[in-house]
Image (cartoon, helix red, strand yellow):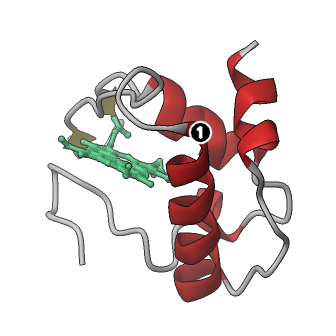
Amino acid sequence: MGIPNVVPSLKGDAIVMMDNPQTLISVVLNGLATTIYTNQQRYYAMPGFADRMENQNIADLLMWIRAEWGGQSTPISARDIAKEKK
Ligand code: HEM
């Protein structure tokens, strides 16, 4: 789904489909600045969740998203999230 020029779809998203969950974890912890593409497309900024969600909840959510939309079944633990916060 997503909203054109506002929010990207997570289904089929390259970051969600990566073998290594590190980029996805970092996006959710730190958010993303507004992105402007050369073809006039753009997305708004995404807020970070490092201070708003428990590590375990982030881990559970990302495991679900990766399984549902990325076909990835590697486990993600609260410790993986903590490591990414450093
Ligand atoms: C915690 C749940 C969320 C997850 C797992 C998540 C995941 C992602 C991912 C993986 C991307 C990168 C897409 C890409 O560039 O390929 C993204 C981008 C984005 N997200 Fe989220 N998101 C979450 C919550 C939110 C919320 C609550 C908002 C809005 C208030 C939001 C707004 C956006 C926007 C605007 C972008 C595009 C940013 C840009 O490229 O400039 N996200 N999200």
Q: Is 23 in front, or is 78? A: 78
45 lies above or below 67 = above
Could you say where residue 30 lies in the image, as x and y percent from the top left? 49, 23
Q: Is 45 in front, or is 51? A: 51
Crowding around mark 1 (Cα neighbors within 10 Å: few <14, some 14 to 19, many 20+) is: many
- Residue at image point 49% right, 39% down: 28
Q: Quadrant of the N terminus?
A: bottom left
Q: Is 14 in front, or is 61? A: 61
Quickly name the residue at label 1.
55
Q: Quadrant of the C terminus?
A: top right
68 lies above or below 74 = below
Q: Is 55 in front, or is 22? A: 55
Residue 68 is left or right of residue 25, and the answer is left
Counting every numbered tag in the picture gives: 1
Residue 18 is left or right of residue 12, and the answer is right
Could you say where residue 85 lies in the image, as x and y percent from the top left? 68, 19
Q: Residue furthest top?
A: 86
Does ligand 1 reach within 8 Å of label 1's beta carbon? no
- Residue at image point 79% right, 81% down: 73
- Residue at image point 63% right, 79% down: 70
- Residue at image point 77% right, 52% down: 77
Task: Specify the quadrant of the image occupied by residue 81.
Answer: top right
Circle 1: residue type: Asn
Could you say where residue 75 lies in the image, as x and y percent from the top left? 82, 68
User: Label 1's element?
Assistant: helix
Could you say where residue 6 lies in the image, as x and y percent from the top left? 15, 49
